[in-house]
Every structure is written in C-alpha cells, then in structure tokens.
Amino acid sequence: MKTCIELCLTVCLAWTLYAAGPSAAARPATAAHAQGTASSESSSLDYTFFKSRVEPIFLKKRPGMARCYVCHEEANHALHLVKLSPGNTSWSEEESRRNFDTVSQLVNTDDPLKSKLLLHPLAPEAGGDAFHSGGRQFKSKDDPDWKTLADWARGQKAN
C-alpha cells in the first residue's frame, strides 16, 4: 500500500504529464511569454507581503494534507517553488524573489479572485478547480490561509 506522499507524488507526476500535452514543442514559447509578462503582473503585487505572509503558507502542514512545498519544490508545472537548501526552514532573499516571480504568474491581476493560485487548491464545492493532485487544501474561502492568498492577489500591501 502506498503512503499518502507516494500517492500524491504519483498523482502529481500523472497530472504533470497530462498537463504537458502531447507535444512539449510549444513549452519554450509559453515559458518565454510567461517570463515576459511576469514583471507587469508582479508590479502590483507586494513582495514583502508575499515573503512574510504567503511563503509560510507553502511550508505549513495542514491537517490531513502534505505541505504545498512537498509537491511543488522544483516541480515541472506552473507552481514550482525553489528547493530549500539542506537544513533550512525558509528561503533566502534571492530564493524568495524567484518564488515571488513564479507565483506572481498565477495571479490574474485583472480579476484576482479568478487567479489560478486561488482556484486550483480550493475545493470545487467552494468554487475551485475540479482537480488538484494535492487534494482540497482549502475547503472554503473562509480558510484564513486562502484569505491571505486572496489579499495578496488583490494587491494588499504589507503593514
């Protein structure tokens, strides 16, 4: 019998292969486009808020779930977080900046509440995506961590 983490990793791999589509030929153009738009999208997002309030959510152990980081460290999909250096429990300034650039690409600045960052891990019953290989990290929009992500996506600044 597979452990929860083994099962999660198996499903993550399957979803990654499915999401990649039949041809990876278009991937460089897509990645280049995403890189080109990241600076304009991230300009309305607050880095300090991200580092102090959003990044910790990715490392937080949620009851019955794996940490977001477990499936998203250097993953081969849209949310790929920088791998922590051995012995570290948080990211360096440079690593956090890289995470910020990556995660900012998952925010729809024109309609923040429709951001992939918010909808993908949200339960479908609450308006989220039907499939998230890491399970329903947020059962509702009332979850304090979901609200924190939403505040950041809406452009809230750090105090």
Image (tube, rainbow, N blue to C red):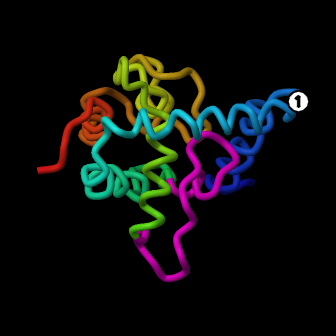
Amino acid type indicated by mark 1: Ser
Give whichever of 124, 118 is nearer the camera: 118
* Dominant SS type (magenta): loop
Residue 98 position, x and y percent, is: 49, 56
| Residue at the (26%, 57%) spot, across then down | 52
Residue 123 position, x and y percent, is: 45, 26
Residue 115 position, x and y percent, is: 43, 26
From the image, tell me which residue sits under label 1: 23
| Residue at the (63%, 32%) spot, across then down | 33
Q: What element does badge 1 sit on?
A: loop
Kindly indicate the quadrant of the structure image that contains residue 104: top left
Q: Is residue 106 above or below residue 83?
A: above
Residue 72 position, x and y percent, is: 58, 51
Left/right placement of residue 44 relative to residue 17 reads left
Name the quadrant of the N terminus: bottom right
State which region is magenta: 69-92
Q: Is residue 76 above or below residue 73?
A: above
| Residue at the (39%, 39%) spot, across then down | 42
Left/right placement of residue 77 relative to residue 103 reads right
Kindly indicate the quadrant of the structure image that contains residue 73: bottom right
Left/right placement of residue 44 relative to residue 105 reads left
